[in-house]
Image (tube, grey):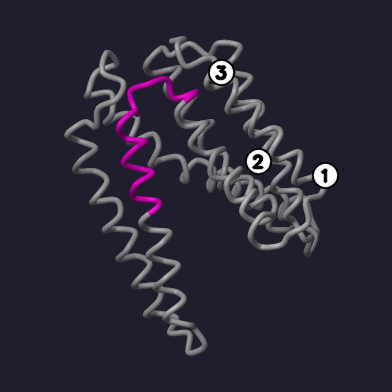
Amino acid sequence: MGNGTNWCAASLGFIPVSLYSAIRYKERLTLLKLGALAAGVGCVVVSALTNSHGGATLASLASMLGYGAVLVAALMLNSLNSIAIKTLGMTAGPAQPVQTSRDNNLFLPIMYTTCFLAALADLLWHRNPNLAVGAMVGFGAMAAFGSIIGMALLAMCASAPAGVVFTLSGISGIVTATLVSVLFLGEHAGIGWYGTIGLGIVSILCGALSSDSN
């Protein structure tokens, strides 16, 4: 299987947290919120198909089921941090949609410290001699800085409806990466590119229009 399905599963983490919030916190999934979710799923799928370069096919039903289970596990595990931020963010109170809770102020440093230690252990274990350390540190620092700021901003509005906040958070990253790939990296703007951008814009508009609904 190609990398597209992996990318798709890793990028749909806004679905479990939206369903979790609808069940636990009784957040209504209005038509606009459902539209944002549906367009978001379409954006991720189109992006995944566009970036999939093919690969080995799965030979048996057992291997297909096993691969599907891995993708579902990736989807669920990738959404755990969003579910944690949403749960902790509700301690700030739904009446205060833009306020970082005390619990999230503790959770985020713990999460990033754990990620750093895990990445460092993996790096030391594999000891790749061809690794460009300077480029790795530079791009790693840039990605870490952006991720930390983004997660901190996400935590500030975690008590707002998850169907809007987490969907827009997930889709904005895909749309930004898609734009950068063409505008600055010279990639071809094909049908998949326009589909990703178009569905991303639809998802963002639906989320923005539904921001006043609960």
Between disc 1 and disc 3, the foreground one is: 1
* Residue at the image position 45 percent from the left and 81 percent from the top: 126
Q: Which residue is mark 3?
A: 33
For marks 1 and 3, the one nearer the N-term is 3
How crowded pointer 1 is (Cα within 10 Å; few <14, some 14-19, many 20+) is rated as: few
Instruction: Using residue 125 as the reference point, say whether residue 35 is left or right of it.
Output: right
Instruction: Using residue 51 as the reference point, say whether residue 145 is left or right of it.
Output: left
Residue 51, percent from left and from top: 72, 55
Please name whichever residue, 201 or 38, is drawn nearer the observer in this view of the structure. 201
Quadrant of the image containing the N terminus: bottom right
Between disc 2 and disc 1, the foreground one is: 1
Please name whichever residue, 38 or 190, is drawn nearer the observer in this view of the structure. 190
* Residue at the image position 36 percent from the left and 43 percent from the top: 151
For marks 2 and 1, the one nearer the N-term is 2
* Residue at the image position 22 percent from the left and 24 percent from the top: 91
Q: What residue type is disc 1 on? A: Ile
Element type at mark 3:
helix
Vertical comparison of 84 with 111: above or below: above
Q: What residue type is disc 2 on? A: Val
Instruction: Using residue 207 as the reference point, say whether residue 87 is left or right of it.
Output: left
Element type at mark 1:
helix
Q: Residue furthest bottom?
A: 129
Q: Which mark is residue 85?
A: none
* Residue at the image position 21 percent from the left and 31 percent from the top: 101
For marks 2 and 3, the one nearer the N-term is 3
Vertical comparison of 51 with 123: above or below: above
Q: Which mark is residue 191?
A: 1
**Would you say residue 163 sits in the magenta stretch?**
yes
Q: Which residue is mark 2?
A: 44
The overriding secondary structure of the stretch rendered in magenta is: helix
Range of magenta residues: 146-164
- The alpha-carbon separation of the residues under discs 2 and 1 comes to 14 Å
